[in-house]
């Protein structure tokens, strides 16, 4: 939920960054491989030409070329993919292990101090992969390291370096340990952060599932109550209709007026019960009404003004062409809930603002009431979080958020610069609009 939402966003398309931990982790592996390739090339050229140790340059450069090709393919996949599976990460790490084995085989095998670089692959596997894949990397690394102790191409030390293999090994070990420490800090920490982001996302999904289950229970309770109330309300309407024609009532204008008020109240209760049943998917004997945005919003505002006389409500439509929409009662009730909340928050006027962008119909309710506290903005849309300070309140915004979310949209809240609150609903045109008529209303 946005905590600082300028009114200009009513008519701007929303952009939501989407990424997955697997994709981010593969991107880190690509970066690690670029560093490894650069390190290999520098080391090979420095040892062969700088130190005079003759290495099989052609095969070692060929292995580095294979790593470059693999990295190019991985980079291309990253640009097209949204998520990357554990199996792909495992194969990528396995490829790195085999390339490292090939380079070590050509440069001294187990006597090469850089054999400790296997630990980097194992550490990355322990962070990125599941249990069996991790042990697979451990097994392959241990097997390759063992084979390199038996089969390898010995280093050709001649001239001033002859007899100084141990000294070179000590220096190489120090360089290797330093490289391992730096690589672990540079890459394991970002990988850990990626996994934390993923865990936070999963926790959010679990919370969303719990909230939706809560909505289902509330919907069942409301639907059951509506069914139970329907019969006595109908009986009461019949009784009041009979009273209105009784001589004892018609001879007293004051009683006639009271009966009319009671009939109006019963009619309003029946309309509310019908709305509850419609919202729960029942009593839909006909197709949902099709209307245009302006008529739909004006109808909501007109009904709300009748129920709340004396409260100024102004409708403002942005300079756009609006599509024809399906007038779903749940949207009507959601907007009505927001208007009721603004009135109960002490507002002396309310603005109902309507706009659109290329993907969504944007409806905002702005008032000059008490606004939201910082705690309310943090917990916006959670049940039983109310700015009115009353026990049991706070379900209105909770239902609005989840109704809009069910439609594929989003709800944002903020405080206005001059006080009051602003709540913005983004309803996807693909859900509420008619595909065959995208610009039906001027």
Image (cartoon, grey):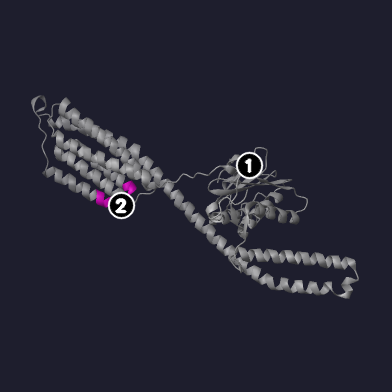
Q: Say if residue 331 shows up in the picture.
A: yes
Mark 2 or mark 1, which is nearer the start of the sequence?
2
Tell me which residue sits at (32%, 52%) in the image.
130
Q: Say if residue 3 shows up in the picture.
A: no
Residue 420 sits in which quadrant?
A: top right
Say which element carries label 1: strand
Q: Is residue 426 above or below residue 218?
A: above
Direction right: furthest residue: 251
Find the magenta span and give its range: 126-137
Q: CA distance from mark 1 to mark 2?
A: 46 Å
Dominant SS in magenta:
helix
Residue 43 sits in which quadrant?
A: top left
Q: Is residue 49 above or below residue 137?
A: above
Tell me which residue sits at (56%, 42%) in the image.
12
Q: Position of residue 42 (x, y in %)?
A: 23, 30
Q: Position of residue 324 (x, y in %)?
A: 60, 54
């Amino acid at each position: 939920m946005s905590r600082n939402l300028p009114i200009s966003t009513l008519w701007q398309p929303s952009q939501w960054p989407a990424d997955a931990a697997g994709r981010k982790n593969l991107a880190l592996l690509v970066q690690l491989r670029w560093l490894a390739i650069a390190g290999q090339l520098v080391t090979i050229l420095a040892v062969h030409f700088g130190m005079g140790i003759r290495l099989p340059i052609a095969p070692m450069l060929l292995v580095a070329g294979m790593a470059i090709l693999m990295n190019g393919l991985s980079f291309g996949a990253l640009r097209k993919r949204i998520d990357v599976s554990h199996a792909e990460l495992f194969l990528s790490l396995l490829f790195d292990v085999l390339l490292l084995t090939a380079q070590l085989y050509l440069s001294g095998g187990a006597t090469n101090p850089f054999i400790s670089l296997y630990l980097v692959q194992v550490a990355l596997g322990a962070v990125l992969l599941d249990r069996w894949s991790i042990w697979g990397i451990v097994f392959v690394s241990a097997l390759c390291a063992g084979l390199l102790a038996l089969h390898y191409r010995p280093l050709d030390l001649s001239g001033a370096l002859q007899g100084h293999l141990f000294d070179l090994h000590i220096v190489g070990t120090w360089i290797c340990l330093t490289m391992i420490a730096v690589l672990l800090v540079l890459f394991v920490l970002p990988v850990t952060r990626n996994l934390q982001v993923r865990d936070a996302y999963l926790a959010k999904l679990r919370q969303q599932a719990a909230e939706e289950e809560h909505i289902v229970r509330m919907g069942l309770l409301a639907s059951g109550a509506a069914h139970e109330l329907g019969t006595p309300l109908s009986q009461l309407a019949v009784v009041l209709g009979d009273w209105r024609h009784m001589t004892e009532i018609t001879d007293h204008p004051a009683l006639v007026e009271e009966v009319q008020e009671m009939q109006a109240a019963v009619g309003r209760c029946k309309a509310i019960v019908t709305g509850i049943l419609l919202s729960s998917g029942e009593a839909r004997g006909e197709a949902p009404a099709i209307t245009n945005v302006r008529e739909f919003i004006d109808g909501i505002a007109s009904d709300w003004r009748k129920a709340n006389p004396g409260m100024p409500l102004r409708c403002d439509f942005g300079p756009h062409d609006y599509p024809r929409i399906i007038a779903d009662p749940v949207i009507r009730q959601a907007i009505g809930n927001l208007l009721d909340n603004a009135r109960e928050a002490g507002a002396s006027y309310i603005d109902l603002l309507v706009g659109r962008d290329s993907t969504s119909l944007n409806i905002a309710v702005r008032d000059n009431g008490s606004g939201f506290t910082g705690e309310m903005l943090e917990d916006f849309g959670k049940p039983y979080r109310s700015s009115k300070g009353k026990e049991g309140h706070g379900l209105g915004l909770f239902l609005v958020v989840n109704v809009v979310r069910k439609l594929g949209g989003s709800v944002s809240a903020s405080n206005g610069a001059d006080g009051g609150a602003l709540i913005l609903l983004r309803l996807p045109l693909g859900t509420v609009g008619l595909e065959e008529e995208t610009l039906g209303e001027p």
